[in-house]
Image (cartoon, rainbow, N blue to C red):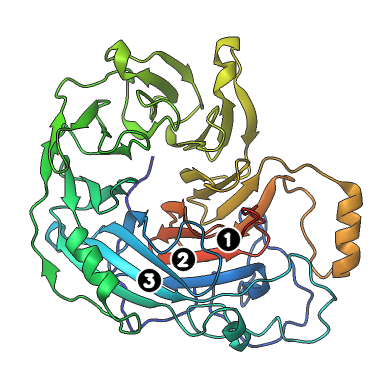
Amino acid sequence: MVRSIKNPKKAKRKNKGSKKGDGSSSSAIPSMPAKVWQPGVDKLEEGEELQCDPSAYNSLHAFHIGWPCLSFDIVRDTLGLVRTEFPHTVYFVAGTQAEKAAWNSLGIFKVSNISGKKREPVPAKPADDDSNMDSEDSDSDEDSDDEEAGGSGAPVLQLRKVAHEGCVNRIRAMTQNPHICASWADTGHVQVWDFSSHLNALAESEADVSQGASSVFNQAPLVKFGHKDEGFALDWSPLVPGRLLSGDCKNYIHLWEPTSGSTWNVDTTPYIGHTSSVEDLQWSPTEPDVFASCSVDGNIAIWDIRLGKSPATSFKAHDADVNVISWNRLASCMLASGSDDGTFSIRDLRLLKEGDSVVAHFEYHKHPITSIEWSPHEASTLAVSSSDNQLTIWDLSLENDEEEEAEFKAKTKEQVNAPKDLPPQLLFVHQGQKDLKELHWHAQIPGMLVSTAADGYNILMPSNIQTTLPSEL
């Protein structure tokens, strides 16, 4: 798997170019009808550029924190368990991939004033003017009407940095105590940090004051453990606070058990069951002693820490490297995996004993899958990112419905010439970022996704993501 970011370049803060397409936005009115562009299928002719349709999003913003980040995590906050009203505020942790090892840092940051608006998935009447084709040259897709739906203007970024030795391969915040974060370094070390002081400072800061955070804090980690090699696999248990797994490129997996709120006992005898690099780890959402791993050897293994240091079961999952896995927390029998050959699969773990547990397999992407994650709000929905610069959202409950399709075309008057060979489960395609590396759903803001790439971050809320919310909301 190609994990590093090619030729990392530090973004300049004065650059506020649009991230909404593979080219700059333009206010020129196209003379041809809008057409969906398919990467790998359609080619851009000389002089042509891609334009994003802002009406496809309830919210779309772009930002960066300097050096590109291979990994980040969304930090749980106390602003509300289910938030639906704009503007939104989100807290993050991330790790950089700087040009020189000494320039790296961990970023703890807050993005506030994330504006947006609710739109109908199907327009009430066809647009007969140019209102939906105009797009501004800023970093968000919002227009003046957004004030009715919760704010306008660009998001406000406030950032604090902690010095980090080497590039950050992966970073994860603990679900139960989100100020505790673990980071994987390319030096071969896994470190656990307490970022409570930084998160508290951000929470107390003025929301309308942008902070570039030129200074870097020197802070010692709570604990530091050296693997035999660098790695990327890292996961906190959702059921046992403080329990952590880390896996490396030598195929070793180590279990971390908390001994207090700030100390850990790392088992130096590794779990061994793969023949190549361990790429990703996922704890079971329902069984506190069970976890899954995937590897360059093409296998997925299921482990039970009560049964020793070998897998309880292992099976061939893909013909190429298995880069990422995601265990569905709303339907715990479902495990998703993404491969270096661009395919991703869904397995029903209840069918493992019967042999073929694959219930869905997709070959839409033609380049390596770099991230995959189930929605925390819809059991049948998951998001996928790929090296083909696409972030796709899938709803496995969807099937072709000719009557519904005819009704949709009647309402839209065939304004969009959609390709006919797309899988019916493909709900949304987001483009415009280069070298996509990781994505996460926001567990407290239904429908919000965040992605990181070589050219920075996108925050997006597609307008056709229908999330079922509790009735009292």
Q: CA distance from mark 3 to mark 2?
A: 12 Å
State the residue position of label 2.
Answer: 458
Residue 111: which disc?
A: 3
Residue under numbered circle 1: 430
- Residue 1 image point, x, y percent: 39, 39
Judging from the image, what secondary structure is the residue with disc 2 in? strand
Q: In the rendered image, which quarter contains the C terminus?
A: bottom right
Q: Position of residue 256 (x, y in %)?
A: 21, 31
Is label 3 or label 1 in front?
Answer: 3
Q: Secondary structure at mark 3?
A: strand
At label 2, the amino acid type is Asn
Query: Secondary structure under badge 1?
Result: strand
| Mark carried by residue 209 | none
- Going by the numbered disc 1, the residue's amino acid type is His
Choose top left, top right, bottom left or bottom right for residue 446: bottom right
Q: Is residue 216 visible?
A: yes
Q: Nearer the viewer, mark 3 or mark 2?
A: 3
Q: Nearer the viewer, residue 452 or 419?
A: 452
Q: Quadrant of residue 25?
A: bottom right
Question: Quick one: label 1 or label 2, which is nearer the N terminus?
Answer: 1
Q: Is residue 384 above or below residue 158?
A: above
Q: Are marks 1 and 2 in contact (CB under 8 Å)?
A: yes
Marks 3 & 1, CB-CB < 8 Å contact: no
Q: Closer to the N terminus: mark 3 or mark 2? A: 3
Left or right: residue 387 versus residue 404 is left
- On screen, 305 above or below 176? above
